[in-house]
Amino acid sequence: MSDSKFTTPVIQELLDSELSERSPIASLQEKILAIRNSLRPGQQQMADWQSGPLAISAVPGAGKSTGMAAAAAIAIARQYERSSSRRQLVVVTFTRSAAANIKAKIRKFLRDDLSLPQTGFFVYTLHGLALNIANRHSDLSGLQLENVILITPTQSHRFIRTAVEQWIVNNPDIYLRLLEGHQFDGEETERLRRQSVLRTEVLPELANTVIHEAKSSGISPELLREWSKQTTDEYAILSVAAGLYEQYQNLMRSRDFIDYDDMILAALRVLENDSARRIEQNQIFAVFEDEAQDSSPLQTQLLEILASNREYQQENSSLPTPNSPLLTPNSALSTQDSALLTPNSALSTQDSALNLVRVGDPNQAINSTFTPADPIYFRQFCEECDRIERLATMDRAGRSTRIIIEAANFALKWINNQWLAITKTNNKQQIPDNRQVPFRLQTIRPVEVGDPQANANPAPVGRGLELHTPHDIHHTVELLSQRVIELFGEDPTKNSAAILVRENRQGRWLAEALTPLCKEHKITLYDVGERDRRSHVPQEILALLQFCDRPHSPDYLKAALEALVQRQLIPTQDLNALASLPEEFLYPGPLAAPQPETVQKAARLCRNLLRARLELPLYQLISFLALTLNYDQAELATADKLAERVNQQIAGNSSMGGMLSALSEIVSSERFEPVETEDSEERYTRRGQLTIITMHKAKGLDWDYVFLPFLHENLIPGRFWVPPQSQFLGDFTLSEVARAQIRATLHEESIIPDVSQAWEVAKNLKTSEEYRLLYVAMTRAKLLLWMSAAQKAPFTWSKPDNLQEQAPCPVFPALKRQFPECVVNSTLSKMNN
């Protein structure tokens, strides 16, 4: 839908006529119009909203937060004009930092531009909004916050592990079938190895994936079990998943724990009550949602219900209304006996006004393969809004120089064309499913002349886009270092730069390689992954202490070995084989086969841990383990803080059991904050700093110069790799098959795909998301985008010295062909800015 078609002439005429009257209302209208006219066309469409549903599909750098803040302030001002009611605007965004940012912008517009009180709105994260509703109606939500503990379940969480163990006890026949896999000769050592893989990897991963997917969509264990009856795979994957989910739910209820999805479900239970729903709706005149592409089905339901308010529409009957009510999939609710909500039931938004503005970028959906977020729902919302002419596009972006915009647009179109061609070939005569195309076709356009953004679409530095093909990863570091020195040479405090990596292990390797250079040239190097590793200090210490307490436990031995591998203290190897026979690994007898050097190194380190347990006093153990793990200064400070807290908790009961109990509580409650050795304000994008950060964490940020090294096909788009230790189950993973089957049902497909079909769907989803991740990374750059794909690179970054020929990411050669003037001869020793 075009910008000119969307902007309603009637509204403009109304504003013009009111401006002719010099009244307080006219004065306010004049201020509103001044804000509106300072915005770009796409932002103006949001500012023109007065009622009904509206979808805003935005490109990177289009000014979503500024546009939403301006539109929110204008909507609040109009509410002051037309009504004496105290209804509020609710603004919902994805993170607490984003919420604080948009709240400050709305207040600034109200105070400085509109001369209005800084009230009339609330800004929440989605979970904060849900918790607020649940807390106000605790009798209906079933949440007594003073009696519950909030957790974030992960594959390694003790509730997940306990649910797995209980499921195995209750389902020995199904477990035996999994143990047999597609072939098994009954050999005892192999049986022990498979048990370790199933109990510590396969089943926890399946449980974690399905719990997130199902709960975030309002699917109960009972309904999931019903769905499993439609499948015929030999492992009954959905049935196993339903059993694990049920065990997890029982554990959560018995211990008074809740997770983030329980908060959404509790709020929806409140809104099923007619009286409570009216109370909540009558406090709200509209809902604005940011980052809508990352919403889950339950989150969408919650916002739709709050935004549905016919009484408000009647109070403001002079407002224009949409042509028809808008419903998105699964917008109704019902409860199961388990108190979980399921889609498609009695409470509906039909025949009511939906005052909902959703803003997002479908092409920046990069969380759907490891969270319940699914961009298909925002795409469908956009399609429905387009059908009733309530879709706007924010496609003007001033962040990047023009060559970077051209490169991002080319990559988007090239990837979509390749995906459609491959899908059509694989499906033969079938029409490809456009819902799963990696990108929504929307082109980033430079801003128009006179745009209010300072230095919009700036002039490029150097070529603006620089494409390198180094000999290997060491040559990559040489070229990258050379360019960094040139860019920071004149004034290191002037510009900002970042190296975006796909994996944290790449970041750690780069940090080690670049540290001497940055010290020499007085460039601040900030490795974001260091802080993430500090946040894992309690979990790593707990893993080693549990091993010291029970060294003959296969689970505890494996967890300790995983921590040592993660810290790169021992080589990567088959830990399941080591953990299946702890005594043989730790203390091999004289008749045992000789251990390889990698195994001997791991065994020596483990024996040293056990010796320390016997020789050191209890209060010194955590500090000793921190030194053993080779922690850096900040990690050691975090470990000291942890030791002090644990020793305080076990004062009067100083025992290994007490220490493990205190540590387990800290890890499970997730209330321990790592020690920060530097201020957190804008720590990622400081000027004069070279930041090493993953592509995922870079979303929402930008830098003058962005480096994208190691662009290889085995990582982007990568492939679904079945770990060798679990290949006895087949050429697929249970968790990804289950995820694809659940999503197919939620997308209202006619049949649940079988294992092979679900695996193909899962691979396509991963490919699409990896390409969107590359697109996000490319669009972080303002003045210079530096990209490289070395001819030789590691197959896995856990072994960075094992170099071999690696194919580039498929879009990289296409970029070189499209932009030959940007291809840099990697043998050049110097380049001009």
Image (cartoon, grey):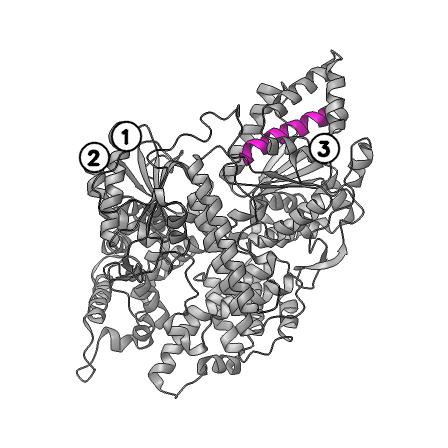
As displayed, is residue 248 above or below residue 663? below
For image coordinates 20% across by 64% down, the residue present is 608
- Tell me the residue that label 1 is attached to: 492
Q: How far apart, in angstroms, are the residues tagged by discs 2 and 3?
A: 55 Å
Give the side of residue 229 with respect to residue 413, left or right: right
Residue located at (76% from left, 18% from top): 17
Mark 3 to mark 1 CA distance (whole Å)? 47 Å
695 relative to 756 in the view: left or right:
left
> Mark 3 packing: few (<14 Cα in 10 Å), some, or many (20+)?
some
Above or below, 95 against 297 in this view is above
The amino acid pointed to by label 1 is Pro
Q: Which residues are magenta?
A: 63-80
Callout 2: 10 Å neighbours few (<14), some, many (20+)? Answer: few
Whichever of callouts 2 and 3 sits on the residue coming sooner in the sequence is 3
The image quadrant of residue 92 is top right
Mark number displayed over residue 521: 2
Q: Earlier in the sequence, mark 3 or mark 1?
A: 3
